Image (spheres, rainbow, N blue to C red):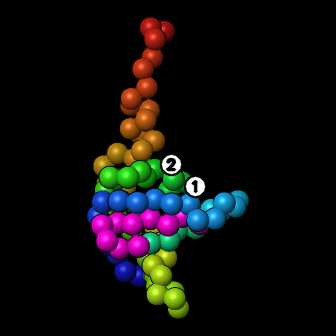
Amino acid sequence: MKTYQGIVTKIKIIRFDSQPLVYFRIDQQDFLIAHHSLNFLADVSIDSHIAVAFTTNKKHQRIVRKYGVIGQTQLMQDFKNLSYSGV
């Protein structure tokens, strides 16, 4: 497995299924993720800094096997930005 890290510049859902197929770009490198793609969509947004471990298939596509967000995930940022009204 190879690794890469950088800033996410594009996210696109290619296939809607019980396990969606998601295309994303880190800097100028293209990646696909199917396994854990729902978690990926909750954790990552444009401008997120992430690290990925990937393999390359016969079509020379980079298939992500593991990922990690460096810093706060999108879900953590959304939760932090919630405003509670005096409870």
In the image, which disc is placed on residue 38? Answer: 1
What amino acid is found at the position of numbered circle 1 in the picture?
A: Leu
Q: Which residue is mark 2?
A: 42
Q: Are marks 2 and 1 in contact (CB under 8 Å)?
A: yes
Label disc, if present, on residue 20 of the rendered structure: none
- Which stretch is magenta? 21-30
Tell me the distance, in whole angstroms, between the alpha carbons under discs 2 and 1: 6 Å
Image location (x, y in percent) of residue 54: 43, 76
Is residue 31 inside the magenta stretch?
A: no
Q: Amino acid at mark 2?
A: Ala
Q: Residue at x 39, y 66 (%)?
A: 25
Q: Does any portion of residue 82 appear in the rendered image?
A: yes
Please identify the residue farthest to the right as the structure is shown. Answer: 18
* Image spot of residue 12 (x, y percent): 51, 60
Q: Secondary structure at mark 2?
A: helix
Q: Name the residue rendered at 38%, 38% in the picture.
A: 77
- Front in this rendered view, residue 86 or 15: 15
State yes or no: residue 26 in magenta.
Answer: yes
Residue occupying the far top of the picture: 86
- Please count the marks in the image: 2
Q: What crowding class fits label 1: few (fewer than 14 Cα within 10 Å), some (14-19), or many (20 or more)?
A: some
Q: In the rendered view, would you say 23 is above or below 82?
A: below
